[in-house]
Amino acid sequence: MLILNERIKVLREELGLSMEKFGGRIGLTRSAISKIESGSNPSDQTIISICREFNVNEEWLRNGNGDMFLDFTEDEFTRAAASLSNDAFVRSLIIEYWKLDDDSKKLFRDFIHKLSDNMREQE
C-alpha cells in the first residue's frame, strides 16, 4: 500500500501536472511539492487544498481507502471543465475523459502519447 507522499505523487502524475503546476494550483512552490513527494509530511491545510482543488477523495489521500477521485455530477463536470478552459472543444474533451473508466483512460493516454511521439518524429 502506498504512503501519503506516494499517493500525492501518483495523483499529480494521474493529473498530468508538473510539480510546479500542481503546486501552483494549491498555493505551493515546486520545491514544496518535491519535498512532500520525497517524504515530508504535508500539512492538513495542504491535504484539504489538494482534495478541494482536484476533487480528490480525502479518505483515499490520507489512508489509501476508496477511489482516488470523488464522483462528479454532470453539472460539476461542466463547471470544473469551464474553470480549466474557455475552449468548448477542450471542455468537452475534459468532461468525456473524466467519465471514462480507468482502463479506458489508460488507453486514451497511451494513444495521445503515441500520437505525440509520432508528431515529434515527423518534425
Image: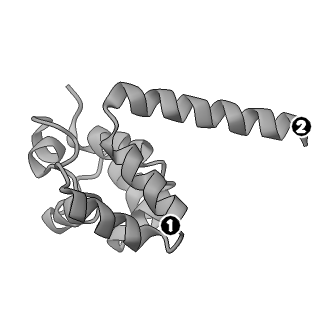
**x, y (%) of residue 18?**
51, 54
User: Are there few (<14), some (14-19), or many (20+) residues within 10 Å of tag 2?
Assistant: few
Q: Is residue 103 above or below residue 72?
A: above
Instruction: Please identify the quadrant where the N terminus is shown.
Output: top left
Q: Is residue 28 left or right of residue 93?
A: left
Quadrant location of the C terminus? top right
In percent of width and height, residue 113 lies at 63, 35
Residue located 44% across and 29% down the image: 106
Q: Is residue 27 visible?
A: yes
Q: Say which label, 1 or 2, has the lower sequence index.
A: 1
Alpha carbon separation for disc pair 1 and 2: 29 Å
Provide residue 2's location: percent of width, then percent of height: 24, 31
Contact, CB < 8 Å: mark 1 with mark 2? no
Query: Which x, y percent locates residue 7?
Result: 27, 40
Residue at left 31%, top 43%?
A: 99
Dot 1 corresponds to which residue? 88
Regarding mark 1 in the picture, which secondary structure is present there? helix
Which residue is drawn at the image coordinates 14% and 42% (left, top)? 60
Which residue was labeled with disc 2? 122
| Amino acid type of the residue tagged 2 in the rendering | Gln
Tell me which corner region of the image, top left, top right, bottom left or bottom right, holds residue 53: bottom left
Q: Which mark is residue 23?
A: none
